[in-house]
Image (spheres, rainbow, N blue to C red):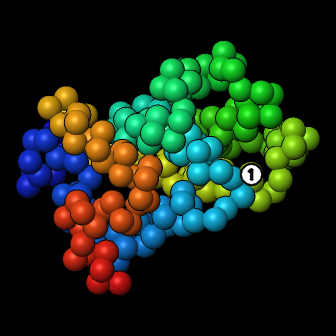
Amino acid sequence: MGFLKSLPPDADIPPVFLFSPPEFVRHLLHLHQVVLRDEGALPVKIRELIAAFTCGTLNSPYCFDAHRTVCEVLGWPLETVDTLVRDIESTDFDTRHKSLFRYLKRLILAPSTLHQSDYDQLSDAGWTDKEINLAIIICCLYNFMGRYTLGHGLRLHPEKAEMERRHGEALANGGYIDDLLHLGLKPIVEAA
C-alpha cells in the first residue's frame, strides 16, 4: 500500500511519478536510460546486476524485484542475484567482480568509511576509472530509487506478479523510456 492518501492500495511507480514534478520525472527517466542502456563502460548485464544488488542491499523489495526480473531476462540466474545480495563471498564471481560489489556494498551501507585504498583495490583488480565511475553512478541512482519507493510505501503485490514480470521483461528488452511510455507516463515523457 502506498503512503500517499490518494494512491490506490496496490500502487506502483507510475502513479507515484504522477505526483512528482513532470520535469523531475523526465530527467529521472532519461538518467535511467543513459546510465543503464546507452553506450557505457560496463555491459548492460553488469549494470542491471548493480541496480538489483543496490536495491536488494537496501532491502527495497519493490525495486529489487523489478531489477531481479530484468537480471533474469538478461541471463543472470535468480540464485546468483539472490546470493550476491546475501553474501558476496559465497558467489561464483571472480575476485575482480567481488571487489567491485564489496566496494558498492560499503558505498550503500557506510559510504563515509571508503578511502583511497578501497578505490585503489578496485583499480588493482583491473577496473578502469570509467568502469568504477559508472558503477558508482548506478549504485547512487538505485540508492535514490530504493529510498524513493520505500519512502512512498511501495510494496510487492502478489496479485500483480505477472504484470510486474512483463514490466521487467520490457525494461530488459526495450529500455526505460520506451517501457514507461506504455505505463501511463506518456504525457510526462513526451512533453520534454
Q: Position of residue 174 (x, y in %)?
A: 41, 59
The answer to whether residue 189 is left or right of residue 103 is: left
Identify residue type, mark 1. Ile
The answer to whether residue 95 is left or right of residue 169 is: right
Is the residue 144 above or below the residue 107 in the image? Answer: below
**Which residue is drawn at the image coordinates 73% and 30% (left, top)?**
98
Residue neighbourhood size for the residue with mark 1, other residues' Cα within 10 Å, grouped as few (<14), some (14–19), many (≥20):
some
The number of numbered badges drawn on the structure is 1
Residue 189: image quadrant is: bottom left
Is the residue 13 above or below the residue 108 in the image? Answer: below
Q: Position of residue 99 (x, y in %)?
A: 77, 33
Q: Quadrant of the N terminus?
A: top left
Q: In this rendering, does residue 155 appear at all?
A: no
Q: Position of residue 35 (x, y in %)?
A: 56, 61
Q: Quadrant of the C terminus?
A: bottom left
Residue bearing mark 1: 132
The answer to whether residue 30 is left or right of residue 115 is: left
**Which residue is drawn at the image coordinates 11% and 52% (left, top)?**
7
Residue at the right extreme of this rendering: 124
**Which residue is drawn at the image coordinates 48% and 61% (left, top)?**
32
